[in-house]
Structures are given as C-alpha cells and as structure tokens.
Amino acid sequence: MSTKEKTWWWVGGVLIILYCLFPIAWIVSLSFKTTADLANKSFLPSAWTWENYSTILTGTASDLFLPALRNSFGICLIATAISCLLSMFAAYAIARLDFPGKKLILGTALGVAIFPVISIVTPLFNLWRQIGLYDTWPGLIIPYLSLTLPISIWTMSAFFREIPWEMEQAAQVDGATTWQAFRKVIVPLAAPGVFTTAIIAFFIAWNDFAYGISLTSTSAARPVPAALGLFSGASQFQDPTGAIAAAAVIVTIPVVVLVLLFQRRIVAGLTNGAVKG
Amino acid sequence: MASIEMKHIVKQYGDGYPAVNDVSLDIADGEFMILVGPSGCGKSTLLRMIVGLEDITSGDMIIGGKRVNDLAPRERNLSMVFQNYALYPHMTVFENIAFPLRLSKTPDDEVRRRVNEASDVLELKEHLERKPANLSGGQRQRVAMGRAIVRQAEAFLFDEPLSNLDAKLRGQMRTEISRLQRRLGITTVYVTHDQTEAMTLGDRVCVLRKGKIQQVASPRELYEQPVNLFVAGFIGSPPMNFLPATLEGNRLQTPFGPIALDERQVAAVQGRDLLLVGIRPEYFEDASLVDEAKRPYGSVFRARVDVTEWLGDSQYAYIPYEAPEAITAQLRDLSRELDSEELRTQAIVSIDSTSRIREGREADFWLDSRKVHVFDPQTGENLTRDAEAGARLTQMASEDRVEQVQHAQATGQTVGGQSSGGSGASGAHRAGAA
C-alpha cells in the first residue's frame, strides 16, 4: 500500500469512528449537565456535575434504577447461558447430522427471528397473568430465549460448519466417544463461535424494551430499558433527560467491558494449523 | 498387532453406486500393505471402512480374528494418520500426542514416558510445548504420526499422509515411515496414489480400479508380471508403451519391426487378430550403445525421434507411431482412467544419457524382446503373464522382509537413521511389547 492510500484509509477510518461515537459522546456529555444546563446549545456542559449519577445511584431514582440493573443482569445472563447451551447442541446437529426436517428447523428459526415482537406481547401478557409468570424472572427469560435462540443457532451452526470433519473423526479413532469428541475437540474449537454468539445473545436480551415494559409491573423483574422509560424529574415540570443519560451511560459500560474482555477470543483464529491451509 | 481380513466387502452409496465392489483381501500380521489406484478407485473408502468411519454395506471385516463390522472406531483400537493431519489446534504437541492415552485414562507418569518415547523416535522433543499452528508441514506430519504410534494399536492406517508435503520432504518422510514400520513391525495399511510410495514402501501392493481389486502382489511382481493392461499402465514411470501388433508365425509385427516370441508365448497369444504389446521404456536402448553380448536377445529398428529429454542420469526419447483407430481410442481411454491425458500415440523410450541421438532425426534403436508382454486389446488381459515367476518374486520379497524386520528390531534403528541409546532402548521395549 502506498503512503497516499494509507493516509486515505486513516482519514476514512477516523471519520467512521467519529460518526459512530458521536451519539455516545453526546450522551456522556448530557449525563454531566445539570437540568438547567440541558438546553445550553453547546456540546459540553457549562459546569460538570455528578448530580445525575448520584440521583440514579443513591438519590430519588435509585429505587427504580438499582433493582432494574440487578434484574437486567440476572435475566440477561441466564437467558444467554440457556440460549448458548441449547443452540450449541442444535447447531451441532444441524451442521453434522443429516436428519429430516433440518431445513424446517433453520427456516422456523429465521421465521421466529423476523416475527414482530409487538404482535405477541399482548397474548403473552394475558397468558403470563393466568399462569403466574407475569412480573417474574422466568416470565422474561422465556420470551428472551425466543429472541436470542434463532440468531444463536444460525451463528453457531456457521461456526460448527467451519470445523473440519476430520478433527472429530481423528478423535473417534483415537478412542473418544461421540460425546468426548464433542466436548474435548469440537467445543474448544468452537469457543470463538460460542463467545461471539453469547455476546450477540446478551446484547439482544439487554436491549429489549417491548417485553420488559409489558410483562413487568414492579421492581421484582423490571429490566433497565423499561425502568428508564419510567424515570421522572424531581417535579413533573422537570426534565429527567440528565438522569436518563446517566443511566444510559451506566448500562453501556457492561457491554463495552464484555466486548473488550472477549474480543481476543472472538478474533482468535483458533483453527489455525489444524489442517494444511 | 493383528491381521486384517476383508471378505467380499461392498460399499454402496445412497445412489446405488458401488465405491468398493466385492473386495477380498488378507493382510498378514506385521505386513505393510499399500492400496493404490487412480482417484475415485475406492482406496480411501476401503481404508475408512477398516477404521470404522464408513459403514460397510455388506461383507465381513475381520481384525485380529474378530468381526468388527458393527464396532465404533474407538472399539477397533486402530490408529490413523489423516491426509491433512487433523491435529487438534487448541492443544500443544505434547497434548496432541497424549490425547489417545488421556482418553484411555492412562496414569500421568505413564503418559509422560510414552509421549517422550514417541517424540524421541520422531525427533519432536524440542517442539513438545508448541501449538500445531507454529509448526512446519513436515513437523505437523510427524506429530500426526506420533499420535498414531503412542499407543499400542492393532494396526496403523495412513490416508495419503505425504500428499501435502513438497517433493523433497516427501522423500525423507517416506523413508522415515518405512524405517518406523520395520522397527515397530506393526500391520500397516497405506493409501496413496503416488506410485513411488507404493513401490518403495509396500511389502505387497493392492491395485484398485473402480472399486475392484486388479492385482495384489509385491512391487516387483506388479512391475514385471502385471495381470492386465490397467496394472501394466499404472505401475511404472514413465509408463509402459503399448504398441499394436499382429502375430505372424512366431513373430509379432509391430510399428517398430518384428519381435520374436518363444513357444510358450506364441501358444498363449494364438488365435487373435490384433494384439497389444507392452514394452517398458527401459527395455529400449540406443542401438549403437548396446552391449554386443546382449544384442542377440533383441531386435533393432529404425525410427524418427520426435523429442528427447536429457535429465543428466537418464535420457528419454519420444517416438511417434501409427496405430489403428480402435487401438488409439482404447489407449486414450486407458490414459484418461490413469489420470493422465495422452494426446498422441507415441512410445517413450529410455536411452543411455551419453547417447547422441538428436531430435527430429532418424536413429537405430534396440529393443529387448525377452521382457515384452502381450495383451488382449478387448479384455486387457495379459496373455503372456508367467504366474509362477510372479509368485516367486513375491515370495522372495516376503523373505527379504522378514530379514529386514529382524535386522531393524535387533539394531533398534531410530527414525532419523542414527542409533542413540535412549531410542534404541525404546525400540527394544516396543518390540518386546509387541
């Protein structure tokens, strides 16, 4: 690559990064503004304040925010774990075995993924109330699985297909049972795929609003996105934008941390050297 | 260690195509058997049926006296080296080699001892802590072999293990495999399409064509007494020349002049209008360079040389000839089946590298008529095959073999060729265990 080309790649890259990060920077900036300062017509706050953060963490909004944070973490982690486990088995079967109805399963998964969430919220609301799942953790985990499973199965089966068949056959010849070959050879090789899938699934569950607001009523199970919608200012004339921005910054942090933690595993070309390229 | 017996093995795929068709083959305990043939002949399928990765449609697979048709690969206790090595990329070389032992719940210090032994033999000692991704092709190949030899398997199976290496390394690994097998004296089945590997490694070679066995014999017998046109054309490089011929009295009339046959041969080929005579390139010579003592055993003919190739130690000349349409078509079919594309009917003859025969000129050639074979163009059958002589060759090969194995095990040769104390002891240990 010539120096000129390199420069253009750099300029292009920086522009894209700026474009993507600008809304986040704005939210961060908003979260440090006082209520009166919100419409100051400048990007930066005129006076930096931690007021919004103290409101949601220790102040009036903390009753709403802190339980919601706990719910979100618990529900999303459980939903992600279950969905990863289930989709791992499903994807392995889809990638490796020849069975009738394979296309049907993949097609159905895709169908579920594109089905509009809002159309089943109301029936689900009625059903959950009758069987006692309304406003409980399982009451959210189950619908979250329907959101995360299809995409998990699709990504994971793509990863499984990449793993050479010979790996498993070699393990079987070496004396492994099917289960041992799966656990000791296939799963470690699919680890980048599992992590990628887990992160995608976690984000989908973490970002959900429709189920969160409709299937909960108290802090027993209400997740953060729903709680943010219920924020109110100190008085009804006061704008809660600052507090919402602060909460948004806080809920963004786990996502960023997750990606930073696992990016090496995601990127790692683990199958390098397994077979001659 | 065990013998492998196959009885009427058939492999039929879903579409009814028989990839392996009624194969019966006995592989003796400790024997090195090569399965060879052009691509699509069913050799890999057969190997995978032995190891259990492919279901057997019908027939019996008997390993060590036990029918294994319905056993899973892990219950057959065979070890296999895959074409692309199939190393586990997330494990170190040590763990890769140790994997079969770990699965059989071998105690830790035993694992360490046996992996060290195997890595000594294969000279992998300094790479044990590395990952396969950081190894060269040859090293990966050796790791794959280490994984195979680390446990006491009933037999080794190799599926074209050298086809991913470059030519020089392939030669080295070939001799290493040969030494290793002689030393361990373990039954080995080796699939290849490379005839150098087939000829140099095997005690016996099984030539397959479209899922059927053509001939099972020692390399020498295959070369000197091929059973049909296919085997004759497949074994040998450059390949055997096939010339159209007709019988007149006790002589064959060919484009390169008459060839005299002895009584036995005449009796065998009688009663056919058109014949194919097969002559290996090295049975020809530049007439001016032939030993006077040898000259009466052959005939001299004059022909125009199309191209010559001088390779330093040898020299090849290409001589075009005319052939009837039927023969040309058949030879073209044969060459296509052997994975090559012969465009014109020409003979490849090997002449002395000092010969001054030049391209485009006429020259005198001598041809040794003692070793020609005559084939039936319709069936491809070798009419002049001397079965007794062939059997003698194979018998001699198996006697040599016994001697080599004894010698190799007595001296405890290492794979690299040098004899060192540690690996010598391990060789003795293995021989003892076997």
Image: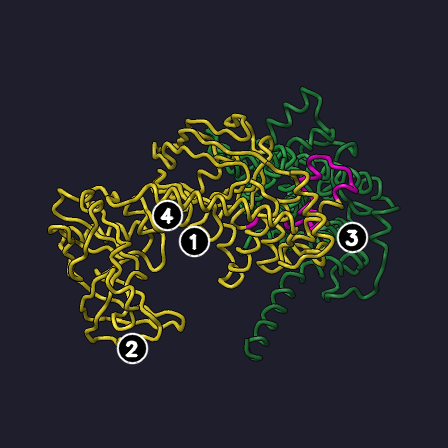
Query: Over which residues does the magenta segment extend?
Result: B85-111
Q: Secondary structure at mark 3?
A: helix
Counting from the top left corner in percent of width and height, residue B77 is at: 60, 34
Question: Which label sits on residue B356?
Answer: 2
Chain B: colour as depicted: yellow
Chain A: colour as depicted: green
Location of mark 3 (residue): A246
User: In the drawing, does residue B245 fall left or right of residue B173?
Assistant: left
Q: Is residue A4 located in the magenta-colored stretch of the structure?
A: no
Location of mark 1 (residue): B194
| Amino acid at the residue labelled 4 | Leu
> Which residue is situated farthest in the top direction here?
A130
On the image, which quarter does residue B217 sit in?
A: top left
Q: Residue at x 84, y 43 (%)?
A: A62
The span from disc 3 to disc 2 (Cα, nearest Å) is: 93 Å
Mark 1 vs 4: CB contact within 8 A: no
Mark 3 vs 2: CB contact within 8 A: no
The span from disc 1 to disc 4 (Cα, nearest Å) is: 15 Å
Residue nearest the observer in this picture, B353 or A91: B353
Tell me which chain the residue with mark 1 is part of: B
